[in-house]
């Protein structure tokens, strides 16, 4: 579970700013709070703000850290991602810190980059009520060498000590992360931390497509039932999703001969190939000696009561967007993952979006977290969210720095119309900052 994320000197974040999933002292929606032993975290966060306020930059910061950890380091200078509106920041590093829970143990991982270098890196087990326990610290010495300090319990043998020394001397490059050497180090806590950052935070961008829709529908009856029930609930006109089988010759055109040959070679090696498409991907497999394509289709009921198949490209943008979300919502119900969706309202009708969000938030058996950015003010409803689950991003007019704050900082009454207050600018982060009178719409061209 994600607990908090902190960044500084990255894109529109000048000074250190924190986003967190920590609950305040509110009694509403108690099923939105997960108990992680020494700490509690929230189920959801809705992040509001004007265009250019920095909502998406928060997600980009999380993704930057995630990709660096997955890749084991950085391969090019980070300087272009620094906050550019303050000259003094050119010499400063960009920094990230993420706190998360694994099996009710709290970990905190942090790293700073400058140019092509890792300046410092560390991983701690957070004590919460007692002192934190260091797992490792990595720094650069004044002479430019890498210094690594690992907790004593991880270097009891001569072999373990030698490996750390080799990391310091030559195995760990200046742009590489020590957490990226988790398989070499064979330290369970480092392996677990890297796995969480890589795999337990899943980011969905406006243009993202869920590529595993076909294999998931094919392999899981439970997921197929869940997806069809959700589509019917939202009155999309789709009676059910199904998987259609096509021959290679029927699916691939004459211009795709080279691609077809490449895929056949891989399939002959025993692989199931997932081919990305605009509607989430298709599967290339070999069954009973034949090369076939499996793709998802939507079925509608015709006027005669019979089901008619449609390609997903024939569905509305809203239905296609909903298909991108359905696997995420299923995961939130079944797994302790943290889904982060940028611009959740894109291509979805406000009424549909509200019903969708309400359905997730009302469910009291979820296991994951649901975090999203939006402009949709209809979701600003304390019947749906707790006050501490509503966040705002606002850009400082003087220095262009993004500010992050929770609605709970304003302590509004529970019966207050949050939507109206937001649109009037009571909480900052208003979606439209210009005066309509200044646009001179009433003046016609001469």
Image (cartoon, rainbow, N blue to C red):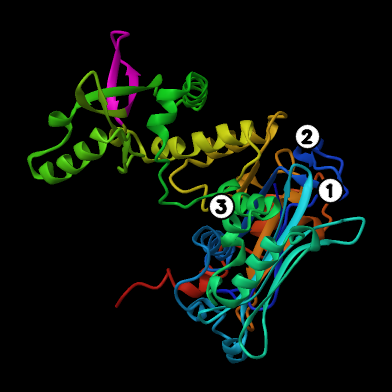
State the separation of the CA atoms marked 1 and 2. Answer: 15 Å
Residue at image position (68%, 32%) is 366
Residue 198 numbered tag: 3
- Label 2 to label 3, Cα distance in Å? 27 Å
Relative side of 403 to 81, left or right: right
**Whole-number angstrom distance, CA of label 1 to CA of label 3:** 23 Å
- Tell me: residue 141, above or below residue 136: below
Q: Where is residue 162 in the image (x, y as percent from the top left)?
A: 66, 67
Asked whether 341 or 355 is in front, the reply is 341
Q: Nearer the viewer, residue 149 or 95?
A: 149
Q: Can residue 90 be seen in this view?
A: yes
List the residue tagged with mark 1: 39
Magenta span contains residue 279: no
- Of the numbered discs 1 and 2, the one sitting upstream in the chain is 2
Residue 263 image offset from top left, x and y in percent: 22, 40
Q: Can residue 427 be seen in this view?
A: no
Q: What element carries label 2?
A: helix
Say which residue appears at 30% left-offset and 10% top-offset.
306
The label shown at residue 31 is 2
Under circle 1, the secondary element is loop
Residue 209, quarter of picture: top left
Give the residues in magenta.
296-311
Q: Earlier in the sequence, mark 1 or mark 3?
A: 1
């Amino acid at each position: 579970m994600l607990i908090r994320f902190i960044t500084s000197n990255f894109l529109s974040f000048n000074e250190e700013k924190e986003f967190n999933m920590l609950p305040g002292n509110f009694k509403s929606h108690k099923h939105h709070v997960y108990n992680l032993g020494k700490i509690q975290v929230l189920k959801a966060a809705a992040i509001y703000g004007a265009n250019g306020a920095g909502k998406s930059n928060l997600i980009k910061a999380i993704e930057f850290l995630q990709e660096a950890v997955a890749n084991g380091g950085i391969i090019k200078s980070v300087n272009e991602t620094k906050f550019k509106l303050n000259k003094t920041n050119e010499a400063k590093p960009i920094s990230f810190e993420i706190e998360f829970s694994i099996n009710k143990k709290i970990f905190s991982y942090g790293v700073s980059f400058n140019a092509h270098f890792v300046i410092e890196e560390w991983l701690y087990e957070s004590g919460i009520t007692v002192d934190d326990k260091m797992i490792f610290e990595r720094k650069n010495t004044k002479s430019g060498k890498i210094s690594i300090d690992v907790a004593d319990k991880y270097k009891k043998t001569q072999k373990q000590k030698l490996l750390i020394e080799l990391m310091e001397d030559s195995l760990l490059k200046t742009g590489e992360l020590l957490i990226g050497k988790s398989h070499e180090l064979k330290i369970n806590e480092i392996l677990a931390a890297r796995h969480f950052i890589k795999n337990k935070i899943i980011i969905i961008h406006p243009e993202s497509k869920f590529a595993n829709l076909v294999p998931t529908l094919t392999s899981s009856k439970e997921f197929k039932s869940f997806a069809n029930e959700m589509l019917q609930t939202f009155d999309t006109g789709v009676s059910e999703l199904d998987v259609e089988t096509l021959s290679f010759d029927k699916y691939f055109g004459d211009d795709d001969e080279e691609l077809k040959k490449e895929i056949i070679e891989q399939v002959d090696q025993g692989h199931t190939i997932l081919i990305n498409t605009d509607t989430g991907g298709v599967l290339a497999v070999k069954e009973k000696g034949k090369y076939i394509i499996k793709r998802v289709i939507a079925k509608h009921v015709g006027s005669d009561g019979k089901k008619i198949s449609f390609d997903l490209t024939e569905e509305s943008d809203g239905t296609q967007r909903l298909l991108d979300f359905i696997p995420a919502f299923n995961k939130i119900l079944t797994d302790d993952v943290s889904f982060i969706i940028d611009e959740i309202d894109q291509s979805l009708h406000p009424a549909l979006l509200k019903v969708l969000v309400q359905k997730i938030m009302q469910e009291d058996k979820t296991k994951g977290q649901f975090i999203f950015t939006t402009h949709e003010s209809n979701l600003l409803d304390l019947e749906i969210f707790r006050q501490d689950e509503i966040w705002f991003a606002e850009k400082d007019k003087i220095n262009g720095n993004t500010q992050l704050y929770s609605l709970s900082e304003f302590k509004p009454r529970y019966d207050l119309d949050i939507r109206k207050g937001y649109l009037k600018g009571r909480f900052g982060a208003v979606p439209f900052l210009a005066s309509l009178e200044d646009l001179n719409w009433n003046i016609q061209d001469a």
